[in-house]
Image (cartoon, rainbow, N blue to C red):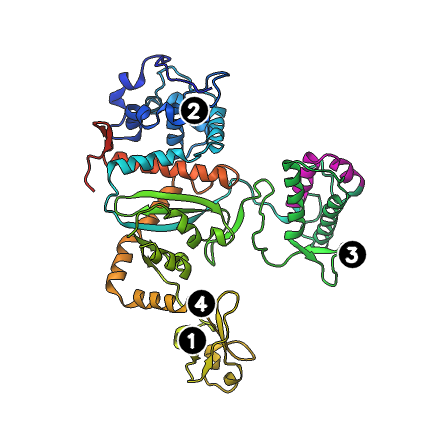
Amino acid sequence: MQGEWTGELVGPDVWETCRGLIPAGSVFAFLAEHRERLFPASMFADMYPSANGRPSMPPQVLAATVVLQSLHGLSDYETVQVLRCDLRWKAACGLGLYDTAFDDSLLTYFRRRLSRSGDPVRLFTTLKDVIAATGVLKGRMRRALDSTVLDDAVATQDTVTQLIAAIRRVVRDVPGAAQVVAEHCTAHDYDDPGKPRIAWNDEAARATLVDALVTDALLVLGHLPEAELGPKAADSVGLLALVAGQDVEPAEGSDGRDGRWRIARGTVPDRTVSTVDPEARHIHKNRTRHQEGFRAHVAFEPEVGLFTAVELTAGFGPDNHEAAVAEHLLAGEETGLTVLGDTAYGTGQLRRTLTATGHTPVIKPAPPQQAVPGGLTAEDFTIDTAAGTVTCPAGHTRALGRPQATGNRQAQFKALCRDCPLRARCTKSKTGRVFSVHADWDLLKAARDQARSDPAWQAEYRRWRPPVERAIAWLVAAGNRRVPYRGVITNNTWLHHRAAALNLRRLVNLGLHHNHGTWALTATT
C-alpha cells in the first residue's frame, strides 16, 4: 500500500534547522521547499492499487531521491549512503537529521512499480508540465535533434563465452535440459562458467573448440524434450539458437552438416553482444567509433536549454535510426517548428514528413559519395528525373530504368565506359558504370544546393545546431556514458529520469518558483 507522509521526523528537521547551510538556488533547496508540490502523493496512487500490506516509503520521497540520483549519476547503494550523511540530500528529501534513510532495494522496487505502471516516465512528464506552466517555451520554435551511443552495463562477450553462457542458461531454465547436456555435450564442463582451458594462441585449438561448442548447442536444441515452454524457458532456447548461428559459419569446404564450423568473418548485423543483456547491440556511430550498447535520442530547445523529448532505443534496425525516431520525438509539438539536425536526420522521408506537418527542416545534407576516392560524384552527372535521363560528364545520355523495390532507378553506362578518358575517376567496375538515382534525388539535391548557397540557412544552422551537442555532453556527464541497467525499457526510463533532473536544474537556475498557484520563472531568457 502507498505510504503517507506523516510529518514525523527522526531528529530535527534539517531544512528548518540547517537552511542556511543548503546552497540557495540549488536543486536541493528547491526540492526541500517544493517537493510535495512537485511530486504530490496523488501522482503515484495508481502505482499502489491495494490498500493492504505494509505501507511503503512515501513515493514523493523516493521520487525526489531518484531525481537527485539521476542528476548526480549515483548507484542505488551510493545514493542511500549520501542520503544518510549529506545534509543537502536530507533536506531535499524531507528526512530528519538522525534518519538513516532506507534500504537501497526500495529504489529498485520503486523503479519496478514505475516501469509496470501506465506512465513509466511520469517524472519527465511532470517536469514537462512545469515547463508548460512557466510559458518559457512559448514562442520558442526551434528544436535541435541529436543522438549518442551509451555503453551497455554488462561485459561484451566473445563467441565462446556466449555459447557457454547460453547453454548454461538453458540448463537453468528449461526442464530436462540438464540431462540432455550431461548425455550429449562434451565440449566443456557446463557447470563451470569460465572459458575452457586451451592454448588460446593456437588457431587450430580455437577452431576445434568452436566446432565442439556449436555442435553441443545444436545437440541441445535437437534433443530437448518436446513440451510447451514458459516465457523464460522459451527466451533461453531462442537465445541459444541465436548465438549458435550468429557468429559462426561452416568451415572452408564444409556445409555444416559434418560439424565443422569457424567464427564468421566480419560482424553480423544486429549481433547480440551479451547473453546477460540480449538487447544490447554493436553500434557504429561513425566509421571509426564502434561501441556496444544502446542509442539515446534527444530533442532539445536550444535557446532556453531544455529537453523536450528523449528516447532510448536499441542500436540497430531501421525503426531505431535517427530519422525514424525523430518523428516520435516531435510528436505532439505545435506546427511551425524549425527542426535542426545533422546528416543522420537528412533522409528524404523525414524531410517530407516535416514539411507535411508544417515544420521547416534545417538539416545538414549528406555529401554525395565518390565511387572512386578523389573522383567524380553524382552531382557531376546531369539528372533529369522528369524526363527519366542521366547524362554523364563525358556527355553520354542514358535512360533511367523502372523504379526498383527501394524506389531507386538505374542508368546503364557500361559499354560507353570502355574507352572513356574519365573512367578511372568514375568507376572501379570492370564492366562499366551503373548509375543509381535515389528515389528522393530531387529533394536531396535541393537540400544540398540550399546548404551551399543560402546564407540564411547557414546562419540558422551554425547558430542553433551546436547547443544540442552541449546538451548531449550534459546528458553523459557524471559517469552517465554507461547505462546502469539491462534492457531497453528499464534504461529508457532511466534516460527520462536523467533528462528530467537536468531540466529541473535548468529551471531552478532560471528561478523556478511557485506563485499564486502556478509555476513561474524569475530570470529572463
- Cα distance, mark 3 to mark 4? 46 Å
- The residue range painted magenta reads 162-183
Residue 502: mark in rendering: none
The amino acid at mark 2 is Gln
The amino acid at mark 4 is Ala
- Cα distance, mark 3 to mark 1? 49 Å
Q: Nearer the viewer, residue 395 or 327?
A: 327
For disc 3, the marked residue is 258
The amino acid at mark 3 is Asp
Which residue shows up at 36% across the image and 23% down it?
93
Where is residue 67 drawn, in percent x and y?
Answer: 38, 31
For disc 2, the marked residue is 81
Q: Quadrant of residue 500?
A: top left
- Cα distance, mark 1 to mark 4? 20 Å
Residue 432 visible, this angle: yes
The amino acid at mark 1 is Leu
Marked residue nearer the N-terminal end (4 or 2): 2
Where is residue 169 drawn, in percent x and y?
Answer: 66, 38
For disc 1, the marked residue is 376
Which residue shows up at 74% across the image and 57% down it?
256
Marked residue nearer the N-terminal end (1 or 4): 1
Question: What SS does tag 1 mark?
Answer: loop
For disc 4, the marked residue is 439
Where is residue 178 drawn, in percent x and y?
Answer: 75, 36
Instruction: State yes or no: residue 174 in magenta.
Output: yes
Instruction: State yes or no: residue 257 in magenta.
Output: no
**332 to 288, vertically: above or below:** above
